[in-house]
Amino acid sequence: MNDHDDLEIRSEGALGIISLNRSSHLNALTLEMIRGIQAQLDQWREDSQVQAVLIKSNAAKAFCAGGDIRYLYDSYQAGNTQYQDFFATEYTMLSTIRNYSKPVIVMMDGYVLGGGFGLAQACHIKITSEKSRFAMPETAIGFFPDVGATYFLSRLDEVGVYMALTGAQISSSDALYLDLVDYHVPSEHFVALEHALSVAPILNPVEIRTIISSFITHPQESELQQHIDLINQYFSYPDINEIEQGLAAANDTLHQDWIKKMQAILEQRPEMAKQISLKLQQVGQNLSLEKCMQLERGLQDIWLQQGDFIEGVRALIVDKDKNPKWQTDNTEFKKTLEKFWPVWSKQHKDSLC
């Protein structure tokens, strides 16, 4: 066993196991954790005894609650470049996992949020439990869904827009319905499944899926599926103002609670975060995963310097007054976006003025 403080790393049989071990912070990823995962993957790539990799959590409540946003906040406020190192290293790790020559399995029990969602999506075989809750909640802190969400959420059409703008949580049943995960295994069977994988003499993709198949169960019906018509109706507009106006003008007494909830959520989100999140979903539909990641990576540094992220983290995480002062005059930010992102300038210049 090899311990890296917030990571527990070991190999059993033909299985390399990386356990996220920062339970007190719901496994929020630090730069050192990301570097540790990257280093271990690099080592196991050359180890013929390790045929597959499992990424899991030692925390009872979460697989991973995302990146350590307090670390990013502190780095930016200190005037150093560690926040840039964090994003760059994280994106390198995600690319390594996606392109790994050996199967990478992820077992998710509890919260799968933000960067944790992106980490899971990078893995090849995705297993969830009835306790799992998925979300990309970045707009709540004045940011945008990143870590590949421009690609994997945009493939969900209106549902992707809904998740990107609202940060709504979905269940494991919903994730299966949306093909965001592969298998549902009861939480109480996770230990037995891990053991079965660790004693298997061969761990190629076919054998792994055969082993998993003996543990899977059918979850409850997707709640999101019951709202799919509403989501398609109200989140299909090309502009955030039209989405909000459509909700405001709704005359649907049967679904009034859901409509009012969506209105309240969107009213709390900063304008630029909503605009850019919507645009990323639209543009991402026509981009490769690599291009989506490049686009996100370029926006991240700009956003910390000129967007609402720092204020969002201050209000919700640091001072906890829950009263963010979102920007109302984004003139300079818009100009920066227009230089960085021509398609933004061409298609959305008027709507942002």
Image (tube, rainbow, N blue to C red):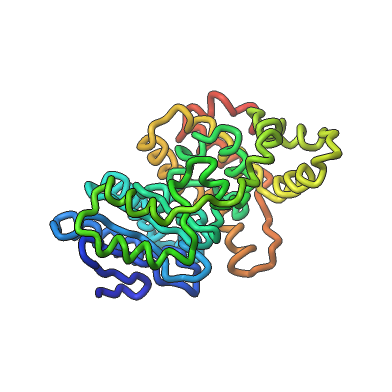
Residue 5 on image: x %, y %: 34, 75
Q: Image check: 12 left or right of 221?
A: left
Identify the residue shown where x is 76% and y is 45%.
258
Q: Residue furthest front?
A: 214
Q: State whether residue 301 appears in this view.
A: no
| Quadrant where the C terminus is found in the figure | top right
Identify the residue shown where x is 63% and y is 40%.
225
Residue 158 on image: x %, y %: 60, 34
Q: Residue furthest top?
A: 346
Total numbered circles: 0
| Quadrant where the N terminus is found in the figure | bottom left
Q: Nearer the viewer, residue 195 or 110?
A: 195
Identify the residue shown where x is 34% and y is 70%.
7
Dividing the picture into quadrants, the one containing residue 6 is bottom left
Q: State whether residue 80 appears in this view.
A: yes
Dividing the picture into quadrants, the one containing residue 230 is top right
Q: Image check: 118 left or right of 271?
A: left
Residue 104 on image: x %, y %: 31, 52
Identify the residue shown where x is 39% and y is 54%.
214
Q: Image check: 151 left or right of 252?
A: left
Q: Nearer the viewer, residue 268 or 55?
A: 55
Residue 128 on image: x %, y %: 47, 55
Q: Image check: 38 left or right of 334?
A: left
Q: Nearer the viewer, residue 68 or 20?
A: 20
